[in-house]
Amino acid sequence: MTNSIITKTGSYIPPDRVPNSHFLENVFYDANGQLLDRPNSQVIQKLHEITGIEERRYAPKEVCASDMAFMAAEAALDGVDRESLDHIIVAHNFGDVNPDSLRQDTVPTLAARVKHRLRIKNPYTVALDLPFGCPGWLQGVILADYFIKSGDAKKVLVIGSESLARVADPHDMDCMIYSDGAGATLVEATSADAGILSHIARSDTFDHAFLLRMRASYDPRQDRSNLYIKMNGHDIYRYAVKTVPLVVKQNLEKSGLGLGDIKRILIHQANEKMDAAIIKRLFDLFKVKEIPADIMPMIISWTGNSSVATLPTLLDLIMRGKMDDHCLEPGDRVVFASVGAGMNINSMIYKMP
């Protein structure tokens, strides 16, 4: 039986650290175009209490999403014959964003740009983009598993890259959540009893399609043709806390495993308070009272929310031994889960080779 394993990882974490104090001079409005009636210091403190974010990373002005994707790919492909790749999948949502005009460039695809910069000549290395909200990288890994198990591929490079900070409205306090970054993984075919055990994805568009969307700035004085990412934060929180645990539980049951079989849960780094609530509800569904303190590694406090890049970056840091309290050994079973615009949710159960 052919299985799919992650053999290599890489990431690009931008060097520019942006602390919470960076936003003390921002002029914030609410969704109705009214100035917020409390000082920025209180706004920043409240956001920190909810999200856990102390700083975030911004890409240098000359670096776009495809550049970050390439750098993450370079790290993941060290020592790998690039001509042997069957697919390159780049998950993103905004393409290469010009920091001056906010225009989004997606032609050619980011995957085509990455393949070009990797200097791959093989025409059968198929390059494709995947816009799927924040769960895009994980959905790319799921697609890689389908490709491999169909027999059509043996090596698939899956990248998540986003310059999310560039589409954030500086007059919306939610802008403090967003950051930039990229992560990459090489998924390969194996006959070993390891790798991807099961996965599930769902799209709840009937009632929730526009919880995340693109709209004009909250500042009524700004150019209305410029669009920024907007979200219904409270509604997203309720949806995620209710639905993500159900999807993970369904996936565990599909794989024949229970919570006690899981070493770590790697969840999209969207909001520390929300992620903790998701984990608590998941354990409640299994009627398990005690949650292991180290079950959910978190990096959002210093990376912010970089959308499709959070999960592969987190995995890369763990695999490279850069998270002292977290390590993964052969045979360990890991849950991956993500939620984002669509609204889309996915989950994957993985056994370490």
Image: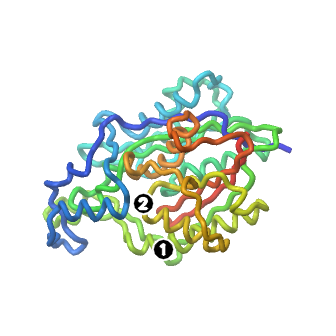
Q: How is the image coloured?
A: rainbow
- Tell me the SS state at disc 2: loop
Identify the image quadrant of residue 186: top right
Picture coordinates of residue 114 (x, y %)?
50, 33
- Horizontal placement of 210 versus 197: left or right? left
Name the N-terminal-most of marks 1 and 2: 1
Disc 1 versus disc 2: distance between alpha carbons? Answer: 19 Å
Q: Tell me: residue 27, above or below residue 124.
A: below
Image coordinates for residue 35, horizontal then vertical, percent = 14, 70
Numbered tag placed on residue 326 in the rendering = none
Q: In the rendered image of this protein, does residue 8 appear above or below residue 78?
A: below
Q: Nearer the viewer, residue 243 or 277?
A: 277
State which mark lies toward you, 1 or 2. 2
Foreground pick, 143 / 119: 143
For the C terminus, the quadrant is: top right
Describe residue 181's horizontal placement relative to residue 253 as left or right. left
**Residue at 44% across, 48% down:** 299
Kind of residue at badge 1: His
Residue position marked by numbered label 1 in the rendering: 208
Specify the quadrant that holds the N terminus.
top right
- Residue 163, position in %: x, y? 37, 45
Determine whether, in the image, residue 132 is placed left or right of residue 68.
right
Badge 1 local density, few (<14 within 10 Å), some, or many (20+)?
some
Q: Closer to the camera, 263 or 176?
A: 263
Q: Which residue is mark 2?
A: 271
Say which element carries label 1. Answer: helix
- Residue at image coords 66%, 55%: 348
Q: Position of residue 223 (x, y in %)?
A: 19, 59
Three-letter amino acid code at disc 2? Asn
